[in-house]
Amino acid sequence: MAEENNTGSIAAAVAAEDEKTSAAKKKRSPRRRKAAAESGRAVSEAPAAKPRRYSEQERKEKLRLIETQVAESNGTLKNAIKSAGISEQTYYQWKRTVKPVEHRAEKPLPAGEELADLVRLEEENQRLRKLLAEKLRAENAELRNRLGLD
């Protein structure tokens, strides 16, 4: 019977500990729904605006407008970009894509005489490279003979 009393006191101690820990635990609120489900509802309630697409001409005009506003009014670039109705990221992307195209258009193609001169220069360049390579090979061979590496 001593054994039964002993286990009973352990069970009572464990029950007392459970009551203490359960009282100390905080109750959780229910989980929030995922953002995807919320955004799905938002789309059905109000249609999303389509992003505006500008033509090349409109882009160039807006870039010119921004540059003139900054130059004339001594205003900040940010204010000029906002007044044009675009974001800073869009401005810099447009500026980056427009610049290389302008540089390509400015470079004139060589004329007939210039092209002939260019061909002659390239041939002379190849000839000089071959002469230099032969001279270096000869010097290398001479140095190897002097050092006794051959």
Image: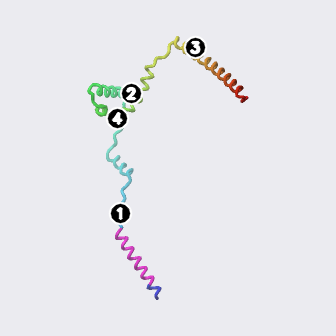
Numbered disc 4: secondary structure:
helix
Q: Pick whichever, 62 or 149, lies toward us.
A: 149
Seen at 35% across and 69% down, the residue is 24
**Which sits earlier in the primary sequence, circle 3 or circle 1?**
1
| Residues at marks 4 and 2 touching, judged by CB atoms closer than 8 Å | no
Q: Residues within 10 Å of mark 4 (few under 14, many from 20)?
A: some
Looking at the rendered structure, the kind of residue marked 2 is Glu
| Residues at marks 2 and 1 touching, judged by CB atoms closer than 8 Å | no
What residue is shown with label 4? 88
| Residues at marks 3 and 4 touching, judged by CB atoms closer than 8 Å | no
Measure the alpha-carbon separation of dots 3 and 4: 49 Å
Span highlighted in magenta in the image: 6-24
Measure the alpha-carbon separation of dots 4 and 2: 18 Å
**Marking on residue 28:** 1
Looking at the rendered structure, the kind of residue marked 1 is Arg
**Marking on residue 120:** 3
